[in-house]
């Protein structure tokens, strides 16, 4: 019997195999070109595996279970877009500067262990993000219909994916047009400083909530359902706190270029625009709320030293 533990275990093995193989080949070739691409491929492999294995001994085959069909389609649409966008971006940029140092591209010594850490971090991210999808596809619960709760969170998940897609497209078009205005305020970037990160975080909270109905123990009493909360929490950890990527990479000391070129315009944009949640009227939000539930933490501020150099955070 292909129980949920079996589906999860093989999914973890598939993830390790893809990422370890990717690391070995990439390091031997001294390239990071397919790092993001293999992340996308990994997501799709887990969706396919769980859809097939989760149907074994289940009350309904995958093709007869609308809940599993829906979650798989939503997941593939989300990760399929990510795969397409990252592949296009890698082609446009002809590389990823994050890996220059660890691959010794600047003439330095290659750092195989640090490069390995990048690949293992991706393995964790792929597997943990996929947890709600794996939970639904491996569930033995027979609930062929959708409740209002299910429909609401499926719609909200789609909204998160759409926001991320629009953010990526608006930013890409802005870059193609020559970065007019020094920083992007097109489309959804007019109401959020990082709408792509918001869409990424929001959709995994929604999928975690959607997966509640697939529990055989009323959700709150099912420990495996609670494990799925690692999907949105780990996404927030990566995008909100880790230096090489996310807000820590986009904000803080890296805002220097804006304050050097257009300090007044950027300060006004920053004051009026939420760091994550798309909204109007952000300038009227009290500072204590910005520093808490709106995630606009002080560490994201640009703090130059008095001599003009950038303060390291």
Image (cartoon, rainbow, N blue to C red):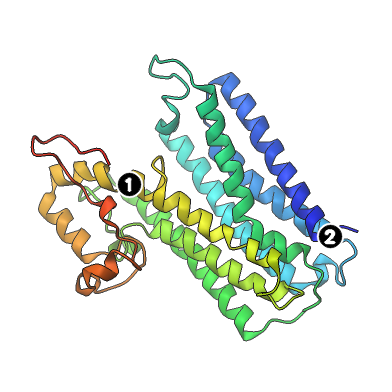
* Percent coordinates x, y for residue 6 in the rendering: 81, 53
At mark 1, the secondary structure is: helix
Q: Nearer the viewer, residue 96 or 2?
A: 2
- From the viewer's perspective, tell me whether residue 113 is left or right of residue 188: right
Answer with the quarter of the image where residue 113 lies.
top right
Label at residue 242: none
Q: Nearer the viewer, residue 196 or 54?
A: 54
The residue where tag 1 is placed is: 250
The residue at the point 39 percent across, 14 percent down is: 107
The residue at the point 60 percent across, 48 percent down is: 126
At mark 2, the secondary structure is: loop
Badge 1: how crowded within 10 Å, few (<14), some, or many (20+)?
Answer: some
Residue 7: in sight, yes or no? yes
State the quadrant of the C terminus: top left
The residue where tag 2 is placed is: 3
Badge 2: how crowded within 10 Å, few (<14), some, or many (20+)?
Answer: some
* Percent coordinates x, y for residue 250 in the rendering: 32, 46
The residue at the point 25 percent across, 42 percent down is: 253
Q: Nearer the viewer, residue 145 or 91?
A: 145
State the quadrant of the N terminus: bottom right
* Percent coordinates x, y for residue 156 in the rendering: 52, 73
Answer with the quarter of the image where residue 123 lies.
top right
* Percent coordinates x, y for residue 255 in the rendering: 23, 45
Tag count in the figure?
A: 2
Q: Nearer the viewer, residue 19 or 89?
A: 19
């Amino acid at each position: 019997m292909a129980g949920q533990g079996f589906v999860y275990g093989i999914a973890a093995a598939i993830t390790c195999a893809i990422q370890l193989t990717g690391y070995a080949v990439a390091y031997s070739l001294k390239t990071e070109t397919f790092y993001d691409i293999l992340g996308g491929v990994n997501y799709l492999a887990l969706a396919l595996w769980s859809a097939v294995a989760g149907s074994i001994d289940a009350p309904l085959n995958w093709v007869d279970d609308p809940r599993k069909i829906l979650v798989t389609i939503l997941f593939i649409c989300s990760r399929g877009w990510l795969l397409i966008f990252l592949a296009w971006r890698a082609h446009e940029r002809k590389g990823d500067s994050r890996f220059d140092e660890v691959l010794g591209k600047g003439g330095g010594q290659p750092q195989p262990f640090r490069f390995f850490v990048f690949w293992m971090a991706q393995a964790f991210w792929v597997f943990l993000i996929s947890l709600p999808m794996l939970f639904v596809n491996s569930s033995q619960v027979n609930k062929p219909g959708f409740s209002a709760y299910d429909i609401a969170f499926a719609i909200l998940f789609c909204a998160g994916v759409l926001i991320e897609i629009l953010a990526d497209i608006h930013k890409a078009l802005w870059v193609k047009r020559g970065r007019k205005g020094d920083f992007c305020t097109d489309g959804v970037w007019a109401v959020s400083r990082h709408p792509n990160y918001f869409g990424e975080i929001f959709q995994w909270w929604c999928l975690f909530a959607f997966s509640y109905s697939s529990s055989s123990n009323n959700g709150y009493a099912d420990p495996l359902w609670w494990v799925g909360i690692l999907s949105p929490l780990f996404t927030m950890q990566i995008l909100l706190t880790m230096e090489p990527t996310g807000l820590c990479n986009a904000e803080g000391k890296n805002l220097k270029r804006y304050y050097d070129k257009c300090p007044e315009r950027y300060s006004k944009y920053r004051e009026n625009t939420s760091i994550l949640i798309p909204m109007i009227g952000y300038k009227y939000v009290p500072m204590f709320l910005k520093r808490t539930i709106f995630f606009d933490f002080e560490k994201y501020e640009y703090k130059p030293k008095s001599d003009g150099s950038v303060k390291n955070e």
